[in-house]
Image (tube, helix red, strand yellow):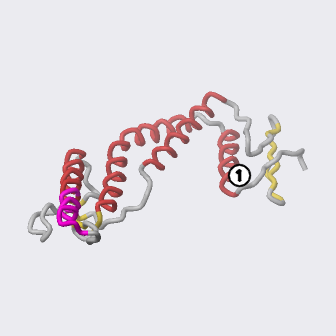
């Protein structure tokens, strides 16, 4: 039975009393709990590495007037193609800036390709490469988590749910006696 009152939760079951708080939850199988925590931590880390917001429309073309077929870098999974695009942009940007220096221009417009700066393209390429290279690991971790979660008891599932709820809502959950 669970009672929610004034941001506190009291959880009891017939077998034992379970005390919960933000620091630690007693779960029947500690090794299982630790494995799930490690998987969650790594998934969160991978998500953060690949995180960010795309800053371009993703439509890259090797010719500025767009006569060639473009590459949607937001969907491309070919790492070699993404690296080729970056090399191309970097060379064009470096050449453009060298030309400004050659003509001793103190100010000149920032380099853009297909209406986006090199920094915007690099941001999008970093996100896409991270997503592409981490997909296999993310899929394996998600499958392992799904499989391990099948071994959780109902009490363990409740404790994990309350732990997630506690951290999401910033609640300090402390146990108590049966009402």
Q: Which residues are magenta?
A: 94-105
Q: Residue furthest left?
A: 67
Name the main secondary structure of what is drawn in magenta: helix
Assess disc 1: are there few (<14), some (14-19) or many (≥20) residues with their C-alpha within 10 Å of its C-alpha.
Answer: some
Position of residue 124 in the picture relative to residue 50 (left or right): left
Residue sitting at the far front: 104
Left or right, 134 with respect to 19, comes to left
Residue 95 versus residue 24 in the image, above or below:
below
Residue drawn at x 66%, y 29% as measured from the top left: 30
Where residue 172 appears, as percent x and y from the top left, is: 78, 51
Return the residue at label 1: 166
Task: Name which residue lies at 87% across and 45% down.
Answer: 176
Front residue of 158/126: it is 126
Q: In terms of depth relative to the viewer, which is nearer, 87 or 40?
A: 87
**58 inside magenta stretch:** no
From this view, report whether residue 123 is shown above or below residue 28: below
Q: In the depicted view, which residue is nearer to us: 102 or 84?
A: 102
Is residue 170 toward the left or the right of residue 41 in the image?
right
Please state if 147 lies on the left or on the right of 178 as rendered: left
């Amino acid at each position: 039975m669970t009672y929610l009152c004034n941001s506190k939760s009291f959880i009891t079951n017939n077998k034992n009393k379970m005390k919960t708080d933000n620091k630690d939850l007693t779960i029947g199988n500690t090794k299982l709990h630790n494995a799930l925590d490690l998987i969650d931590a790594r998934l969160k880390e991978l998500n953060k590495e690949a995180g960010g917001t795309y800053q371009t429309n993703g439509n890259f073309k090797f010719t500025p007037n767009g006569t060639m077929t473009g590459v949607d870098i937001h969907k491309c999974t070919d790492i070699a193609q993404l690296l080729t695009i970056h090399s191309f942009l970097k060379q064009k940007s470096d050449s453009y800036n060298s030309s400004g220096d050659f003509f001793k221009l103190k100010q000149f417009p920032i380099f853009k390709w297909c209406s986006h700066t090199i920094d915007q393209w690099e941001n999008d390429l970093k996100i896409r490469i991270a997503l592409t290279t981490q997909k296999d690991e993310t899929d394996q971790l998600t499958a392992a988590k799904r499989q391990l979660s099948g071994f959780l008891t109902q009490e363990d599932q409740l404790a994990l749910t309350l732990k997630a709820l506690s951290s999401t809502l910033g609640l300090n959950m402390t146990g108590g006696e049966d009402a």
